[in-house]
Amino acid sequence: MMPDRVKNVERIIAQVPFGGAQRRDLERAELHKWSELEIIRVETESGIVGWGETVQHYAWGKVDDTDSVIGKTTFETMWDDRLGPGLQMALFDAAGKVAGVPVYRLIGDKCRDCCAMSYWHHDMAPQQYADEAKTAVELGYVCMKIKMRPWFDVRETIRLISEGTPDDFRVDGDWNEFLNDAGTAIPVLRELESLFPKIKMWEDPIRRDDGAGNRHLRSQVDRPIAHHYQFMQKRDSLELGGVCDGWILNMGVEECMRQGNTCRELKMPLFLQFVGTGLTAALSLHLSAVLKAAQWPTITCHELYEHNMCTERIPIVGGYARVPEVPGLGVEFDETALEKYRVEEADHTIPKHLIRVTRPCGTRIDFARTEQMWEFYMAGNQPVDEWGCHTELLDDDGSADFAKIHAQASVSPVMAQA
């Protein structure tokens, strides 16, 4: 039998909007750009087709070169992370179909039939998060990862989520380092842990490069702490007695397998974090199926899109999704949906707005963009540990006052008394 070589690679831009009532929050956080997907279609000489996708403004890499895989078998190139997410994914999909086996059979020995999955949404007001938690429950999830931001009242957020969800529901809180240091983080995390038993994990509460601070913090709180694997020095992690309890992986297949096997040897759990639609979610299931350390719920964000780009939704039952047994990724790509969302160039323009944070003392701070907020709070320019803050998105009303404040805020955040 002649080897089945790749004869064609097609690259298609699609813009798939986010659904639900929280689209404005994604625009405020500038995550609406995640709607831009590069869809990769790989076809072999025998006519087998593999599909993949790259979220252009989030993924661990982009597809730069497709010619290098032409004339080669999918098995020769599928392990090369340098190809980028979408092309690598499509090659694995096609390779599984060529071999007549699901992708997990190509990458390792299966250790589980069903994988834990977590619902996710970006930072938003407490009541909106509570509404999203109810949606998560309706979709079959028992876990939700939320963003802990100093410009919202996270205590109120967790209170409302706790009150509106079943007793077995869990919340994982991602701080993205906003608590800055152990001295600030310890009393905050202790208080939240004592008030809300549904909290089960903390992600990146303080700076990842603060080895001593992370070690001390870990000794002072009850919940496990997770850090992103690629940003931490493993030698420091071991020599300091452990700066975290587990890891977050979000790289290419080869790197995820290497990192995941290291976690297994260290006897430390992990969770995968892959942003994308149903194709990405399917790949995460195959990886979770063979990575023994992938014991924490996977984050994929595929539920947020208006369409998951597959002909069927991946069922979630009791917080778990079954690993596909069909050859390839095991999901059917929706080519009709692709034609609907296909564009020549993605348009990410949104109306001019201000982001207004109001502190409990009455001080208000106006920002022109989310990037400023990160820099402002990371620099310690306002408290990151007070309760009662709220944030609103103010649209341009055409007034001279708005224009003046926006011009000032575009240069530097504007503080005033409400």
Image: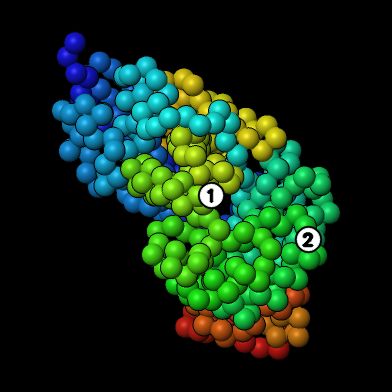
Q: Name the one closer to the observer, 223 or 52.
A: 223
> Relative to residue 295, is residue 418 depicted above or below?
below
Q: How is the image coloured?
A: rainbow
Horizontal and vertical percent position of residue 30: 51, 61
Residue 400 percent coordinates (x, y): 59, 81
Residue appearing at x 71%, y 89% in the figure: 417
Q: Is residue 345 visible?
A: no
For marks 2 and 1, give the CA distance: 23 Å
Where is residue 294 drawn, in percent x and y?
52, 43
Q: How many marks?
A: 2
Q: Nearer the viewer, residue 325 or 291?
A: 291
For image coordinates 51% across by 52% down, the residue present is 268
Q: Amino acid at mark 1?
A: Pro
Q: Earlier in the sequence, mark 2 or mark 1?
A: 2
Is 263 positioned to the left or the right of 401 in the image?
left
- As drawn, the residue found furthest toward the top would be 1
Q: At numbered mark 2, what does the secondary structure look like: helix, strand or loop?
A: loop
> What residue does disc 2 label?
196
Instruction: Check residue 269 in the rendering and tell me which mark sits there, or answer none.
Output: 1
| Residue 262 horizontal side relative to residue 117, left or right | left
- In the depicted structure, whether residue 262 falls above or below residue 401: above
In this rendering, would 347 be left or right of 173?
left
